[in-house]
């Protein structure tokens, strides 16, 4: 049975009785979008460009829950201030433990600290959420949640 249409829109059809309706939502683990709206698999996407620099291939991975959204500006500011205070110390620690090269492509110059899970998606400025990337890989990665650290350094 069709429902009443509002504002001149087409009426939405009710599901067929007895038919299984899947309300399961999955999210892309890289960009955080609903799987149906994700463009990470498309050629030329930021994820594809990032993985190509590191000689890796795309392997889809889905999450059952979205990343945290709408992180308040006060939290973002506090996390960035905390990172600025600890930057040299953490950079030295990561360089000693992982080597002085980009975790993605192996480049040895213009290394910067990068959040594995970005602050905008609820990540924190802690040593266990940081990796060394070259400035090019960091710029391409943007807000994607990609962990390039060696397996022994992951949580």
Image (spheres, rainbow, N blue to C red):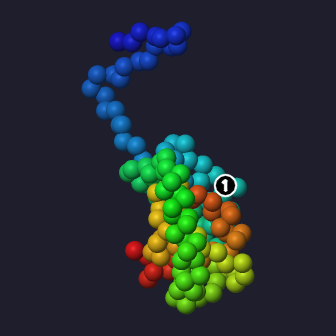
* Percent position of residue 133, x then y: 63, 74
Could you tell me which quadrant the N terminus lies in? top left
Residue that carries the numbered disc 1 in the rendered image? 45
Could you tell me which quadrant the C terminus lies in? bottom left
* Percent position of residue 84, x then y: 58, 72
Quadrant housing residue 104: bottom right
Residue 1 shown left or right of residue 8 in the figure: left
* Percent position of residue 76, x then y: 53, 57
Residue 45 visible: yes
Residue 35 visible: no
Residue at x 40%, y 43% (from the top left corner)? 25
Q: How many marks?
A: 1
Q: Is residue 76 above or below residue 90?
A: above
Q: Is residue 145 above or below residue 85?
A: above
Quadrant housing residue 144: bottom right
Q: Is residue 19 above or below residue 1?
A: below
Residue at x 53%, y 51% (from the top left corner)? 73
Q: Which residue reaches farthest bottom?
A: 96
Q: Nearer the viewer, residue 13 or 101?
A: 101
Q: Secondary structure at mark 1?
A: loop
């Amino acid at each position: 049975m069709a429902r009443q249409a509002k504002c001149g829109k087409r009426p939405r059809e009710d599901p067929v009785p007895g038919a299984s309706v899947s309300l399961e939502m999955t999210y892309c683990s890289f960009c955080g979008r609903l799987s149906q709206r994700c463009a990470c698999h498309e050629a030329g996407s930021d994820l594809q460009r990032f993985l190509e620099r590191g000689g890796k291939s795309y392997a889809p991975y889905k999450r059952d829950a979205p990343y945290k959204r709408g992180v308040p500006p006060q939290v973002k500011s506090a996390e960035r201030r905390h990172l600025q205070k600890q930057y040299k110390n953490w950079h030295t620690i990561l360089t000693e433990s992982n080597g002085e090269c980009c975790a993605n492509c192996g480049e040895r110059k213009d290394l910067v600290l990068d959040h594995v899970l970005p602050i905008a998606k609820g990540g924190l400025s802690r040593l266990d959420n940081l990796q060394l990337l070259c400035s090019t890989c960091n710029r391409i990665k943007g807000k994607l949640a990609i962990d390039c650290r060696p397996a022994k350094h992951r949580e």
